Amino acid sequence: MYEVTIKKSFSAAHVLKEIGGKCEDLHGHNFLVEVTVAGDALNGEELLIDFRDLKKWTYEILDHLDHKYLNEVEFFKDINPSSERVAKFIYDRLTKRIQTMNLGLMVSRVTVWESDNARVTYTA
Ligand SMILES: [Zn+2]
């Protein structure tokens, strides 16, 4: 099994309700996102996937979050826009995108760092 990982950062603000402490106040993060796709078969160029394609698709998804107040993004309207939910948001959209292309790939994990020493991962 091969795995290919890219990373990209974005900035956003959020409020996490009912968890207590400072996170209930409006604050922002410079999130760092790592996306990993996996598969067994290489393409005709001996690549699992072209980094440029994976970057492009990930960047398009992050565009919906970058410089946004996450609580007002439709997906997070009724839930806390936690890093866990951000990871799932990215995972679901990237999975959908990759499935439509029939590349024999799956998104194996999405990791979201919300600070230098705190991250969450959503895995398949
Ligand atoms: Zn936060």
Image (tube, rainbow, N blue to C red):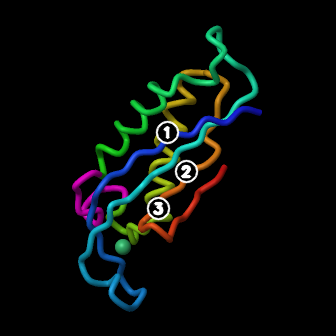
Q: Are marks 2 and 3 in contact (CB under 8 Å)?
A: no
The stretch in magenta equals 66-75
Residue 52 or residue 123, whichever sits in front: 52
Q: Residue at x 75, y 27 (%)?
A: 40
Image location (x, y in percent) of residue 114: 42, 66
Determine whether the residue tagged by mark 1 lies in a helix, strand or loop.
helix
> Which residue is identified by label 1?
94
Q: Which residue is mark 2?
A: 110
Judged left or right of residue 80, residue 97 is right
Q: Position of residue 38 (x, y in %)?
A: 67, 35
Q: Secondary structure at mark 2?
A: strand
Foreground mark, 3 or 1, reads 3
Label 3 – label 1 distance at C-alpha: 18 Å
The answer to whether residue 5 is left or right of residue 66 is right
Q: Are marks 2 and 1 in contact (CB under 8 Å)?
A: yes
- Viewer-nearest of discs 2 and 1: 2
